[in-house]
């Protein structure tokens, strides 16, 4: 279930957001706005090339958030709809935006388990403390304790075997100039704290194959298990599937 207006999960499964007739936007708007078409979760599920069923997202989802404030049960839309279809699936994954809002709250309430994903180009490098503050705000708003079951540090390092000649030359001169890379040091500090607070973490290296798999619409865990990043994604999938997160 892609509940992020950026629709990255939708694109990564080979579906252009403008292609489906309906998306998660229509589901939310059907609840929040009496004048909008009412659709159910079943109405918007589509089968992707990978065999994974998808609830697609769309940039229009940004416009649904203000409307939701008028809907009394706005925090429970996903959980109510998932209850109607959950017996069809072994697992349902909910992709939420990396910022506090209605879609994150819906996802957290609907979820049995929570995985926290960091990437160097997101809020992760602004400090782990900001993440903890967001979670505290959610706890106060919902009146429930939130436990993070696993953390995924995505694109956290680059395998030496995947380094280009330019990477190696740059690394040589960077080392001569300064033995300590501030970005690497910050990531190391975050990793240490996440390991201490959450315990179970997966560190995913950078890989050019991630972009390739996204263009193909085929998850790297399925199409590139020989790739270092694909191996970790496969391990994450196995960890979820074997019941460790149940």
Image: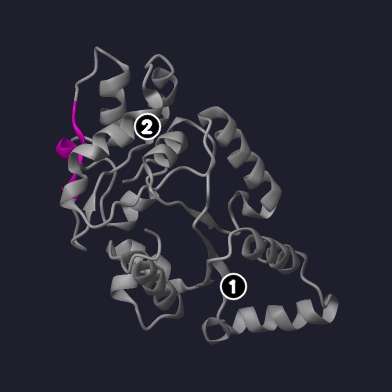
Residue 182: mark: none
Labels 1 and 2 touching (C-beta < 8 A)? no
| Label 2: how many Cα within 10 Å (few below 14, some 14–19, many 20+) | many
Q: Is residue 233 above or below residue 94?
A: below
The answer to which of 67 and 116 lies nearer the viewer is: 116
For label 1, the residue is 157
Q: Residues within 10 Å of mark 1 (few under 14, many from 20)?
A: some
Q: Which residue is found at the position 31% from the left and 27% from the top?
A: 28
Q: CA distance from mark 1 to mark 2?
A: 32 Å
**What colour scheme was applied to this rendering of the protein?**
one colour
Measured as percent of width and height from the top left, residue 102 is found at: 45, 30
Query: Residue at the spot x=24%, y=18% of the render?
Result: 36
- The image shows residue 196 at horizontal and vertical percentages of 66, 63
Spot occupied by residue 85 in the image (x, y as percentages of width and height): 18, 42
Q: Exactly how many numbered labels are in the figure?
A: 2
Q: Residue furthest bottom?
A: 161
Element class at badge 1: strand
Q: Earlier in the sequence, mark 1 or mark 2?
A: 2
Q: Which residue is mark 2?
A: 61
Rendered location of residue 89, percent (x, y): 20, 54
Depicted 49 relative to depicted 94: above or below? below
Of 61 and 107, nearer the camera is: 107
Span highlighted in magenta in the image: 39-46
Quadrant location of the C terminus?
bottom left
Q: Is residue 42 magenta?
A: yes
Q: Residue at x 25, y 22 (%)?
A: 30
Q: Nearer the viewer, residue 79 or 184?
A: 79
């Amino acid at each position: 279930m892609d509940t992020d207006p950026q629709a990255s999960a939708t694109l990564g499964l080979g579906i252009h957001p403008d292609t489906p007739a309906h998306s998660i936007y229509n589901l939310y708007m059907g609840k929040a706005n009496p004048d909008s078409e009412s659709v159910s979760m079943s109405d918007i599920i589509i089968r992707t090339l990978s065999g994974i069923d998808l609830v697609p997202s769309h940039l229009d989802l940004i416009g649904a958030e203000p409307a939701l404030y008028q809907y009394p049960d706005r925090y429970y839309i996903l959980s109510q709809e998932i209850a109607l279809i959950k017996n069809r699936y072994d697992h349902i994954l909910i992709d939420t935006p990396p910022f506090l809002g209605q879609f994150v709250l819906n996802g957290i309430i609907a979820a049995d388990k929570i995985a926290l994903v960091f990437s160097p180009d997101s809020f992760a490098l602004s400090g782990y403390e900001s993440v903890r503050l967001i979670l505290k705000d959610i706890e106060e708003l919902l009146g429930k304790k939130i436990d993070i079951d696993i953390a995924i540090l995505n694109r956290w390092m680059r395998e030496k075997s995947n380094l280009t000649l330019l990477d190696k030359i740059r690394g040589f001169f960077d080392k001569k100039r300064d033995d300590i890379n501030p970005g690497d040091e910050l990531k190391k500090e975050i990793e240490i704290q996440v390991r201490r607070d959450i315990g179970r973490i997966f560190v995913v290296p950078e890989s050019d194959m991630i972009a390739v798999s996204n263009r193909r619409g085929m998850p790297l865990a399925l199409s590139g298990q020989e790739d270092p990043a694909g191996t970790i994604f496969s391990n994450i999938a196995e960890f979820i599937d074997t019941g460790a997160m149940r």
